[in-house]
Image (spheres, rainbow, N blue to C red):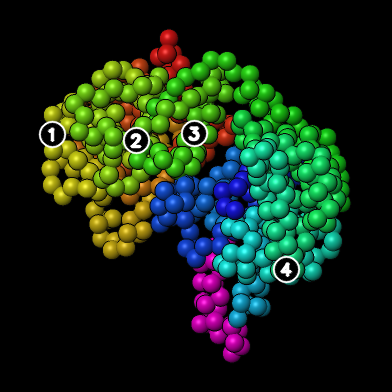
Amino acid sequence: MSGLGKGITCASIGRLLVDMGYKVVPIKIDPYINIDAGTMNPFQHGEVYVLKDGTEVDLDLGHYERFIGVELTGEHNITTGKIYRNVIEKERKGEYLGQTVQIIPHVTDEIKSWIRRVAEKSNADVCLVEIGGTVGDIEGMPFLEAVRQMKNELRHEDFMLIHVTLIPLDRGGEQKTKPTQHSVKELRSLGLQPDAIVGRCAERLKPETKRKISLFCDVPVEAVVSNEDVEDIYEVPLRFREERFDEYIVERLKLEKRPYKRDWEEMVKRLKDLKEEVTIAIVGKYTHVRDSYISIVEALKHGGIYAGCRVKVNWIESEELEGKENVEIEGDGILVPGGFGKRGAEGKIKAIEFARENNVPFLGICFGFQLAVIEFARNVIGWEDANSGEFASEGHLVIDLLPEQKEVDRLGGTMRLGEIEVTIVKDTLAYRLYGREKVYERHRHRYEVNPMYVEDLKRHGLVVSGYSDGGRRVEIIEYPKNDFFIGTQFHPEFKSRPYSPSPIFVGFVKASLENRG
């Protein structure tokens, strides 16, 4: 089933290989017809993750970057939409020389050539390909067929198929293997036999469960791997190592077993040894689907590792704050994340006002940054009609499209996406956090701080501590009257890693820990 943990499994295998000194390149296949994840609702699909080249992708690519330590681009994400677009463009150009264009061989050839191209270009030792969706889904069939063909085209030691399945517990606590048996039967009907089976279960697989799966699914017992629930996803590579999955993989692929780097293991130990705890209130509009903010939660965790504390999240639905006279937010720090649209915006503004007036550490990201500017304009400057051009047409539009954006007639065309250079002003909180004048951070937004009002905002005490485009675009704002109050137009969470955390998040968690007293 979807959401089972294929992404974490793939990322963890990549981490094991990287720890042995192998170069790994991951590719995620999403069988949906969308070209990318940019237009998808977070309620349906979780977080939209942004790569350095501005490609909007599935959240699994975020796991790959955090676990494997690679920076990916749009070519590392294949969708049905991308494949069919390429095939149709070739057909229109006459590249198929009058042939009838079909799923086999034209679509499957396009899939195979894309995988090979990325693998060869990367010069990696191992290319990891995750096929999203579920075996049997009609949209995934061309990809599984392409994989079947590749299996026959490659040497035995150059191809390995790992199947991730659900092993549920019945009411008596017995581990049930029948869903796995049916899933493998479905896979075999497509001409594919797994080399290993990773069993997702609430608890560690028992030896008899492994033997039963081995018997009915025709894989060695040592190739049936337990992937039970863990306290933290960063433990999964270490559990795989306990299962000796790494040894099976290198033997199957005829790779050399090399000594491990212990950095990941040490990081997990630090994480598990943390005793102190801070509570961060995340005031969002997609809080019913926690995957909508997965990179933020992970970045808070990374900040906690370096600040010396565990981070507990208090989820607050912003719409529930609207219409309340006196808002009180429970948390040692308050974070208002990104989002689009008017729904829940006024509730977020109330949360920002609470943080500013009560000197609670505050971090606003993207939409949260924009709403912090609106809150300041309304409640400090006194412009009661301060608003964003995203959901108002008159008043003090302190957030708005820039003039050249208004000339674009396609919604996606106004988006600012990907990694952009940001200049940081010295003697500011942002400079103390980053320690340098130039940084590169990833963006995903449409609206900007309106240049018309920047001087008014600064005159009343708001500090612009980061900018881009020669000073024309505001990237970071601060309110120095508070101990920690900062907002970023960019998304620092997208570049945060457990071994290299975002400086913004480290500073925010440290300030929240100090606020806890």
Contact flag, marks 4 and 1 (Cβ < 8 Å): no
Rounded to the nearest angstrom, the CA distance separating label 4 from label 2 is: 46 Å
Q: Name above or below for residue 149 compared with residue 352.
A: below
* Type of the residue with mark 3: Val
Residue at left 56%, top 62%? 31
Q: Amino acid at mark 1?
A: Glu
Q: Earlier in the sequence, mark 4 or mark 1?
A: 4
Residue 255 visible (yes or no): no
Image spot of residue 56 (x, y percent):
47, 53
- Which of labels 1 and 3 is toward the front? 3
Q: Is residue 83 magenta?
A: yes
Q: Which residues are magenta?
A: 78-101
> Which residue sits at x=48%, y=59%?
36
The stretch drawn in magenta includes residue 309: no
Q: Is residue 443 above or below residue 90?
A: above
Residue tagged 4: 189
Lower sequence index among marks 4 and 2: 4
> In the image, residue 249 lies at what x, y percent?
81, 47
Per the image, the residue denoted by label 3 is 297
